[in-house]
Amino acid sequence: MNDVLWHTWADTHQARPRRMATPDNTDEVVSAIAAAAAEDLRVRMVGTGHSFTDVAITDGLLLSPTALTGLRSVDPVAGTATVAAGTPLCDFNEALAEHGVALANMGDIAVQTVSGAVQTGTHGTGRDAGGLASQVVGLELVLADGSVVECSAEEDPELFHAARVGLGAFGVVTALTFAVRPAFLLHAREEPMPLDEVLERLPELRADNDHFEFFWFPHTGNTNTKRNNIVEGPARPLSPLKAWLDDDLLSNRLFERVNRVCRRFPSMVPTVNQFSSRALSARAYTDVSHKVFASVREVRFVEMEYAIPAEHTVDVLREARSIVDRGDHRVSFPVEVRFAPADDVWLSTAYGRESAYVAVHMYQGVPHEKYFADLEAVFTSVGGRPHWGKMHTRDRSYLEGVYPRLEDALAVRERVDPHHRFGNPYLERVLG
């Protein structure tokens, strides 16, 4: 397929590759890479475009995994499930549920491909359960020389540790094996809480809940908190009317209209945020885990997110509030704060340290550069690690100071892709 224009979900980047291919299986990926090598084309595989960076952009061969989908196998006894790389997370969740198993944790958007989400370090929030990559126990990759390899903690462990959050730099991931657990219910408790109270009670809120997160509304001292805890049941999901009212009408349709008005009249943002933060009412419900973890996000935005050492959370949030209160910015989107335990994935934002994730957003089309720059300076002052798929300005010279195993990962890359067949400008900036 030639003369194709591909763009990210938020339209932050566009690509017009020399060719685009949609392989049906691993063998077709091998053939596509061989053909690209014969023409000296670089190769990238995209997902659904939910990254805000140019991590997937190429002028060579762009692989789309829309046909590389489906559950390959499930072993409830062993607690593993293998899935093709292009399978959307929402489809993977449903397939796992049919077998009575589930992922231990996931992010709040489920339309990404499993490979794209894992490769860029997608995470949720959890006291004990980490991000998606920490749940991966095996990978199938096609390397630059066309060989198909499988890696795990026992089989080529260095490639496994480097390539789990690999940004597509180590090979094209064609299948992933996840650790899964018996299906479970989550009781969700959502309620407003003053920001000062959240920060004062943060150790307690994190320790007492399986999954805790909060959203702070800039220009206010208000937050909305969410506590998800594993329960035996019974399931008591939101009524269809309540789900439509809260999650469709208010959180998407009305929020879209409000942001359009605020984009045109920025001076209204503080007043609107005061109203929005007080319009939210407490609610509680119990449902299957993946329905509680994930939500629908239809309003388009741009985003920057950093993982900071968890012990700096309170100071960073207070400094962020001070920056907004100085009045230089008008921010209509809440700031999202989540948490993750340390993991052993070399290029994971949570590698080796308990982390807090602070995500800042701007409505699509609203100038974001100065706001993001001011907050990025705060995040980097405490050794923050930028989410690989979200906007940031860091390069290798900074990243090698916050990733202790970066040099080890780059050595693996030189072994499996010495000519950087899978490279692109983004990888040149962050990996060299």
Image: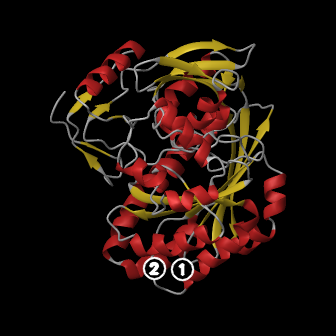
Instruction: Give left or right: position of 380 versus 388.
Output: right
Instruction: Give left or right: position of 162 versus 36.
Output: right
Instruction: Give left or right: position of 39 versus 387.
Output: left
- For mark 1, give the secondary structure: helix
For marks 2 and 1, the one nearer the N-term is 1
Three-letter code, disc 2 = His
Depicted 329 relative to depicted 309: above or below: below
Query: Which quadrant is home to the N terminus?
Result: top left
Depicted 278 relative to depicted 63: above or below: below
Which percent across, then down, holds residue 128?
78, 43
- Kindly indicate whether the residue at mark 1 contacts the one at mark 2 (C-beta within 8 angstroms): yes
What residue sits 63% from the left and 58% below the top? 402
What residue sits 35% from the left and 47% below the top? 9
Q: Nearer the viewer, residue 157 or 181?
A: 157
Which percent across, then down, holds residue 289?
66, 34
Instruction: Using the numbered discs, state the Cα–Cα distance from disc 2 to disc 1 in whole angstroms.
Output: 6 Å
Q: Which residue is mark 1?
A: 324
Q: Which residue is mark 2?
A: 329
Q: Nearer the viewer, residue 425 or 237?
A: 425
- For mark 2, give the secondary structure: loop
Which percent across, then down, holds residue 417?
44, 32
What residue sits 54% from the left and 62% below the top? 398
Depicted 217 relative to depicted 51: above or below: below
Picture quadrant of residue 229: top right
Q: Nearer the viewer, residue 335 or 163?
A: 163
What residue sits 40% from the left and 54% below the top? 299
